[in-house]
Amino acid sequence: MAKNKRDVDAKVKKAALEETAARLFMEQGFEATSMQQIARALDVAPNTLYWYYASKDELLVGVLNRLLSQTLQHLPAMGGLPLKAQMAWLLDELEQSREMVATVHSRLDQSPVIRAWHDQFHQFVESTVIFALKTAGVEASRCATLATVATFLVEGLLAHPHSAHQRHDILEWFAASAGDQLGGAAV
Amino acid sequence: MAKNKRDVDAKVKKAALEETAARLFMEQGFEATSMQQIARALDVAPNTLYWYYASKDELLVGVLNRLLSQTLQHLPAMGGLPLKAQMAWLLDELEQSREMVATVHSRLDQSPVIRAWHDQFHQFVESTVIFALKTAGVEASRCATLATVATFLVEGLLAHPHSAHQRHDILEWFAASAGDQLGGAAV
DNA sequence: ACCTGAACACCGTTCAAGT
DNA sequence: ACCTGAACACCGTTCAAGT
C-alpha cells in the first residue's frame, strides 16, 4: 500500500490525460472528439490510452469524477442557504458543464458504465436535497417528491435554452409552491 | 401537382422504409442500428437509403413525423380533461416511444436537423398546454411558467425510471400547486 | 509497467455506373 | 427516377511486440 514513485507517476499521468480529455470534450463535444485526437494532444500513440482506461466511456467517467470533485469543494459553503438559492447555485455550477451533462444523458442507454455513474450521482444529489428539506422542517412524506421535482426542474432548465427571466419565474414558483403547502417553512 | 403513379410509389416506399427503420430503432436503439441493417431488412443496397434521405438523421426525422402523426390522431378526445389527466395521457403515449425520445435528446447537439425538429415539437406542445391552461381559467401571466414546468416534469419522468406511486405523487403535487395559486380553477 | 505499429471490424456516406 | 458495387475516410478497440 506504500505510495511508491510508480503510483505517483501514474496518478500524475492520469490527471494530465483527464484534463486534456476534459478540455477537448468541452470544446468539441464527446462524440466529436476521437481517441486519436486526445492521443495527438498528449503526444502518445492512440492505443496508449487503453492502458489507462478500458474504453472511451471509462475515460469519460474519469473526467466526470474529476469535475465532480472540483465542484464538491465549493459545496460546504452552501449549507444554510434557502432551497431556491441552492438550486440556482447548482444550476450555475452545472451550466459550466452543460456539454458534459448532455453527454452523460446521451450515453445512458449505450454505456452501462455511464449509466452506473449517472444513477449514483442522482442518488447522491437527491439524498442531499432530501436532507436539506428535512432540515428546513418540510414534512417527511413530501420530501422525496419535492426533491425529485427539484431535480427534474434543474435538468429541464439545463437541457433547454431559457432566459434569466424564465429561470427566475420557475424557481420562484417552485419555492412558493413547496413552501405554501406546509405553512411557510423557510424553503 | 397531379398525383401520378410515381408519387404514389415513392410514398409507399418511404412508408415501408420508415416502418422498418422505426421497428429496428425501437428494438435496438438508433445508434445500434446501422444503415446496412435497415437496408438488409428491406432487401436493398445500403446506399439506396440515401436516395430517399440525405442522412441517417433525416431518416430519423421521417420516423419521428410518422410516429407523431399517429399520436395526433388520438389527441382530439383529450380536449376537455383536467391537466393532470392530460399529462398522464401524454406520459403513457410518450412512454411507448421512450427509446425515440431519448434518441432525439441524445442527438440534439450533434444534428441540426434533429435539433430543429425537437424545438418545433416543443413549441407545439407548450403552446397547446398554454392554451389548455388559459381555457381552464388560469391567470395569463402564469400560464407560460406552468406549461414549462409541466413539460420538464414529463421529460423528467420519461428519462428516469420511477414507480407508479412516484409518478402519481408528482402529478398530484403539481396539479394541486398549479390550482391552489389561483383559487381552485379546475386544473 | 508502460508504450507502440499495425491491423480488425465496423461506421455513415459518396460517386460513377447501370437500368 | 431509381438502384447498385465499390470505394472513402473515418471510428473505437485489440494484439503481438518492444523496452
Image (tube, coloured by chain):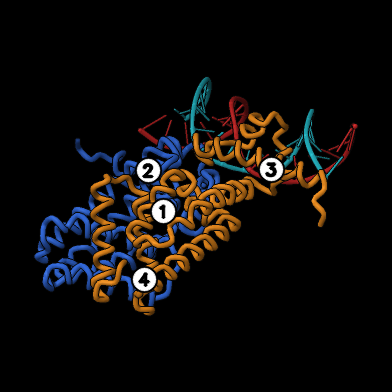
Chain colours: A blue, B orange, C red, D cyan
Q: Residue at x 24, y 65 (%)?
A: B176
The residue that label 1 is drawn on is B90
Q: Chain of mark 2?
A: A
* Numbered disc in front, either 3 or 1: 1
Q: Secondary structure at mark 2?
A: helix
The residue that label 2 is drawn on is A114
Residue A11, quarter of the rendered image: top left
Contact between labelled residues 2 and 3, with CB atoms less than 8 Å apart: no
Quarter of the rendering occupied by the C terminus of chain A: bottom left
Are both tags, 3 and 2, on one chain? no
C-alpha separation, residue under disc 2 versus residue under disc 4: 43 Å
Contact between labelled residues 1 and 4, with CB atoms less than 8 Å apart: no
The numbered mark, 4 or 1, whose residue comes first in the sequence reads: 1
Label 2 sits on what residue type?
A: Ile
Relative to B122, is B31 above or below?
Answer: above
Provide residue A81's location: percent of width, then percent of height.
Answer: 17, 71
C-alpha separation, residue under disc 4 versus residue under disc 3: 41 Å
Label 3 sits on what residue type?
A: Lys
Provide residue B93's location: percent of width, then percent of height.
Answer: 43, 48
